[in-house]
Image (tube, rainbow, N blue to C red):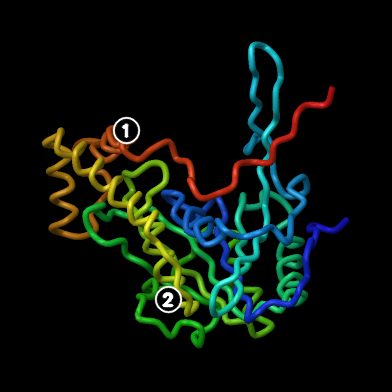
Amino acid sequence: MSLYELLDDAPLASPALVSGLNGWVDAGLAGTTAAAYFGQEGEVIARFDVDQLVDYRARRPTLDIRNGVLDSMAWTELTIKRVHTERRDLLVLTGPEPDYKWQAFREAIVELASRLGIVESVCLGAIGATVPHTHPTPLLITGADRGSLESDLPLPEGTMQVPASALNIIEIYLSRPGIRSVGIWAQVPHYVEGAYFAGALALVERAAGHLGIHLSTESLVDLAREQRARLDAIVAQRPDAQAYLDQLEASGPVPPVPPGEDLSAELERFLRDATGEGRNPFEDPPADAGPER
């Protein structure tokens, strides 16, 4: 059984794949918010069979119950959208990181890349870090080969062994047939919950520059500015939170839990209301299907 359905295989202009998957390596929803921002004006041209890929016990569909009546069921989707820009076409992959069949997912991505003529790939993600929300979002770049990493962005230092993500599968295996493939990763404040718009904005701006396209970011800029104001106002209410933020600003990365007290965990709880409900405002709502009658 095929893992995906290709709905439209019309010719594309120098297509680039932009991927952001919800799950591992999506701190502050920055990667998925950025990818969805690229794809918000697009049309779906490929759809994956999430029944084969998703553990519904971990990612349960949402059920609406109205006055005791089971009204509708909303299912998550994993899709590729086509977006036309002045210079080239973008193919934007968004949705949940697969729980199952990673090898089959890898094969499907490589096959789709060949069928659609993809010439470039950019994976977008984010990690939690001891960085303050008052500073510009730091970015890192990775790639499957040194030739893809010609960039002024810093590389992760030294040798690391980390749990892999499905984005890494895309990054590695699309490079093997010669597709230029990189990952751009935002470092978002570890104390922020919900969507972190400054991180998403940094990824969008950097990825757009990397791909050589122009993309208006006005709405994302406004969201980041409003969120920064809310965060500043809430931190100002707590001298201990302000002191911790001052430490982050002055000394750079510090242990996320200061000695002697669990201040960072308390700060996370304190800032929860300031970072929204965690929803990515640029993604499509889940597919709606009423219950069978």
Residue 178 percent coordinates (x, y):
65, 85
SS at mark 2 in the image: helix
Q: Nearer the viewer, residue 80 or 83?
A: 83
Judging by the rendered image, the residue that carries numbered circle 1 is 269
Up the image or down, 187 lies above or below 88; here it is above
Q: Residue at x 63, y 38 (%)?
A: 59
Up the image or down, 161 lies above or below 158; here it is above
Up the image or down, 99 lies above or below 56; here it is below
Outermost top residue: 67
Label ID, residue 209: 2
Mark 2 vs 1: CB contact within 8 A: no
Q: Nearer the viewer, residue 153 or 281?
A: 281
Residue 248 percent coordinates (x, y):
19, 53
- Type of the residue with mark 2: Gly
SS at mark 1 in the image: helix
Q: Quadrant of residue 175?
A: bottom right
